[in-house]
Image (tube, rainbow, N blue to C red):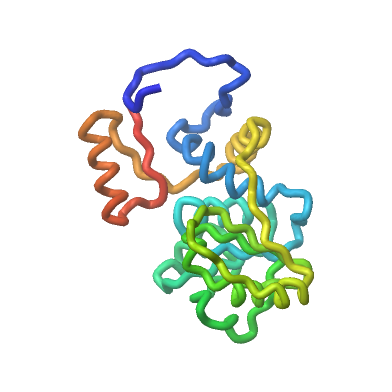
Amino acid sequence: MGTISSGVIWSANMVFPIPDGYDSADAAPLLCAGSTVFTVLTGPDVKSTDRIGIMGIGGLGHLAIKLAATMGHEVVVLSTSESKRQEALEYGATEFHVYDSEKPAPPGFRPLNHLLLCGNTGSKNFNNLIELLAVHGTIYPLTVSAENTPIDLGELTGLGASIRGSLTASRRTICELLRFASRHGIKPTVMTFPMTEDGVKQAIDTLKNGKMRYRGVLVR
């Protein structure tokens, strides 16, 4: 389907029904960014009482905060910028820490059961991130990097911790996410642009300038 096409025909088994009353502009970011974090948060090893760390407040991170908070998790946000504190708390975070993975854990930091890496994983010091985990804790790198990532297996083994990838969400999972978001009133933070040539250019310029908050959506 072309970017500014008016329609397309697909098998009903290959599309995702959007719940009545839920805006398509809000549904669109859930199909990729939302489903990426939802797959982790609904995994078999994640309990509602777990302490969930989210590193990076962007397209993935802001949705991870909203979803995890709604599920009842204790949500701990880690960011390199103090300017993100108020926003993180408004999205549902219970804690916020200014943190750089090149530094040790913040003083008095309580360990995490799970840590979702929602930004650039290639620049992260995984050995310091492992120190943020509780026993049997898990790190989920949710973005792809071509950089080599050295890891101290002694640190990993000593905690019984793991670093785990996340598969692309299934259709069933995405449909479940759409229903969950609709039922609980969870909406991505989006910027909309007209589905025209000028609108596409404006969206790309906004993205290149680092001004996108936090997903751009083309609408008619």
Across and down, in percent, residue 15 comes to: 56, 23
Q: Residue, x 70% and y 77% (percent of image)? A: 155
Q: Residue, x 48% and y 46% (percent of image)? A: 188
Across and down, in percent, residue 96 comes to: 54, 71
Q: Residue, x 41% and y 46% (percent of image)? A: 215
Q: Residue, x 67% and y 31% (percent of image)? A: 172
Q: Nearer the viewer, residue 157 or 187?
A: 157
Image quadrant holding the C terminus, namely: top left
Q: Residue furthest left?
A: 198
In this rendering, would 118 be left or right of 209?
Answer: right
Residue 210 vertical position relative to residue 220 in the rendered view, above or below: below
Q: Nearer the viewer, residue 155 or 134?
A: 155
For the image, the number of numbered tags is 0
Residue 205 vertical position relative to residue 4 in the rendered view, above or below: below
Across and down, in percent, residue 176 comes to: 66, 35
Image quadrant holding the N terminus, namely: top left
Residue 91 vertical position relative to residue 184 in the rendered view, above or below: below
Across and down, in percent, residue 90 comes to: 50, 60
Q: Quadrant of residue 202?
A: top left
Q: Nearer the viewer, residue 138 or 199?
A: 138
